[in-house]
């Protein structure tokens, strides 16, 4: 195989620079993809900056990859040459542990993240285990689909995992990269949808994404009116919140579900869980099957992340735009290697 | 109706004194029971002492009642005169709200606790709405059954609610009034059972209650060996714990379930929930149907709380014994009114 051109960071807070590497022999269960588009996710920034103390430099970020299959190993199943595919947070898992064999391969203890100890999608080509290379439905808009593979599945998976029904009332806290997709999915799911945001400027957009109601989390009167109205509240932000008042928005048996990696421990009063038989939970992206299920659902309902495009060669500009908090709402890099 | 003799407290930390009251006309949906036995629960102490700022004095405690039906209102259903019955934490609920009509009448917003604004079971007779008067299976040992009605249902209900299977591994934190019943139920459920206790002296007894393994929560090596072994961990104690290390004992998709009213907020790291898709939840006692289901299960498996008996006239001595922490493991008062 020829060398792969890519963009890499060599240390925390360092700009990405052109980088090339030899990928070696293609593994028997590996697929190689030519990257067409790659979403830019907040966790790319966290990994570049080693916020989670797990980065291996040089790091080639990018884990919301859309591309075409150009090579397959001898034991690859379910994927064929020239197929249009996506790859998300994980690029591999053992496929023989209890979790993998139960369908929960996103919970495999040895799952291989696409951008930790593995070169990601800010590159000409990407490799992944066939189980994590998800065929794209024909009707899906490939140019905007990248962010579904990580951000999208993160907010979609809870609807599947926790048996949310179209009769349920679902809230989404934070109208950003994840939250705006959460509103679209919950609306298409048939639910009554409430958006919670601290930015009143986002009200009209939140409604355009599918919110029936938009509540300012700073408005204590509006928050009180929302008490006991929700079956599930998905929290997409990564800052400490008033957990007691959010738990109050839940009906009995309701669930507060965390997908934002809040660093400060959540303060949860036992009594706030006990009286209404309430639940707090978290989840990481989703399994291969959940990814395929999500893409089929997104194609049928024409759910597209709202994205801004940058050529991949302007990746540092795109990263600065993401870090500024001004991305509306997700960034996609278009591969432009020479 | 004639006056009812009872034991009541007239203020926080005050001893119980003989007390009598006129119960008025029996309501159309009410049942009156002659009390034979009444369990003594830690929440009786909390209510006597107004720890939850909801006590209405004079308070007649007692909400683990076993007795016989002596009067029924005109609209009573499902209960007949002379029937052997039990009453627990709740003595009534509206029976027409969404929760009641969904079978979750323990989550009714206007549920009537037996000992708050209502006179409880440290009395000759008790009244309750028919829906909360649970017929006892013939095979159940009435003299020890009282504690099932509150403490027992509190640890049994999570097994039902969260679809625990006999293939699951269940842990119980705290081997006390609730925990010892939790071990018995989980063992009879067919699960692998692990007890966590800070008292090594309880190891042999925990095994006799059904624990396959007993782990000292102070032994960090043993705690580490328990990592990723449990599907559900039921926490019955009401003191702050090392929540991070308890969450580590859970398998992916595992649940930490709280039934002890820990007053200090739990410190839960979002990341500890996200990576293994873990859950934290709480629940209050159980519904009428869950109570009946539990009693049938307890009768079939001959599950008896381990109790110490006191005559009800020695209730103050029994309360002091409970407060000392030396009760093994639950106290039942035998009614002895003249």
Image (cartoon, coloured by chain):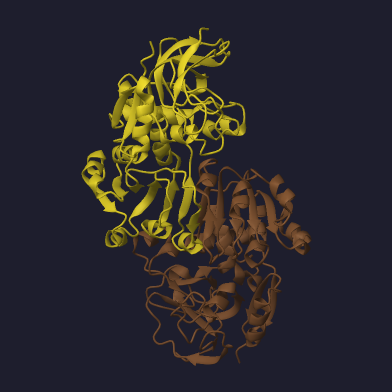
Chain colours: A brown, B yellow
- A186 over A147 or under it: above or below: above
Left or right: B71, with B168 as reference point: right
Residue most extreme to the front: B14
Residue most extreme to the left: B204
- B81 over B226 or under it: above or below: above
Q: Look at 51% across and 20% down and name the residue there.
A: B128
Could you tell me if residue B103 is visible in this image? Answer: no
* Image quarter hosting the C terminus of chain A: bottom right
Return the residue nearer the eye: A305 or B335.
B335
Q: Give residue B75's position: percent from left, percent from top.
A: 56, 13
Residue most extreme to the top: B1
- B208 over B276 or under it: above or below: above
Could you tell me if residue B159 is visible in this image? Answer: yes
Return the residue nearer the eye: A338 or B1.
B1
Residue B222: quadrant of the picture:
bottom left
Q: Look at 38% across and 69% down and name the residue there.
A: A110
Residue A106: quadrant of the picture:
bottom left
Q: Look at 47% across and 53% down and name the residue there.
A: B279
Q: Looking at the image, how many numbered discs can be counted on the residues? A: 0
Return the residue nearer the eye: B211 or A76.
B211
* Image quarter hosting the N terminus of chain A: bottom left
Q: Give residue A214's position: percent from left, percent from top.
A: 73, 54
Q: Give residue A8's position: percent from left, percent from top.
A: 53, 87
Return the residue nearer the eye: A116 or B44.
B44
Left or right: B305, with A8 as reference point: left
Q: Give residue A197's position: percent from left, percent from top.
A: 70, 60
């Amino acid at each position: 195989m020829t060398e792969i051109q890519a963009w890499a960071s060599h240390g925390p807070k360092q700009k990405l620079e052109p980088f090339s590497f030899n990928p070696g022999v293609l593994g028997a269960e590996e697929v190689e993809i030519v990257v067409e588009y790659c979403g830019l996710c907040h966790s790319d920034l966290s990994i570049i900056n080693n916020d989670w103390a797990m980065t291996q430099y040089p790091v080639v970020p990018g884990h919301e990859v859309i591309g075409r299959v150009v090579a397959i190993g001898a034991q690859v199943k379910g994927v064929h040459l020239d197929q249009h595919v996506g790859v998300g947070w994980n690029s591999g898992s053992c496929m023989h542990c209890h979790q993998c064999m139960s369908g929960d391969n996103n919970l495999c203890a040895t799952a291989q993240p696409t951008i930790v100890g593995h070169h990601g999608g800010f590159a000409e080509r990407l490799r992944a285990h066939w189980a994590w290379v998800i065929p794209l439905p024909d009707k899906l808009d490939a140019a905007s689909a990248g962010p579904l593979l990580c951000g999208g599945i993160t907010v979609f998976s809870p609807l599947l995992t926790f048996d949310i029904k179209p009769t349920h009332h679902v809230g989404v806290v934070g109208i950003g990269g994840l939250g705006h997709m959460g509103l679209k999915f919950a609306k298409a799911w048939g639910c009554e949808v409430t958006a919670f945001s601290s930015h009143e400027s986002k009200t009209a957009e939140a409604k355009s994404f599918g919110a029936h109601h938009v509540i300012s989390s700073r408005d204590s009167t509006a928050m009180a009116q929302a008490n006991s109205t929700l079956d599930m509240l998905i929290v997409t932000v990564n800052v400490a919140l008033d957990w007691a008042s959010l738990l109050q928005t839940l009906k009995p048996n309701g669930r507060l579900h965390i997908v934002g990696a809040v660093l400060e421990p959540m303060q949860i009063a036992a009594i706030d869980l006990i009286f209404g038989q309430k639940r707090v939970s978290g989840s990481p992206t989703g399994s291969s099957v959940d990814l395929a299920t999500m893409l089929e659902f997104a194609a049928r309902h024409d759910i597209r992340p709202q994205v801004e495009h940058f050529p991949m060669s302007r990746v540092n500009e795109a990263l600065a735009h993401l870090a500024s908090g001004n991305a509306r709402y997700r960034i996609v890099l278009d591969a432009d290697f020479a």
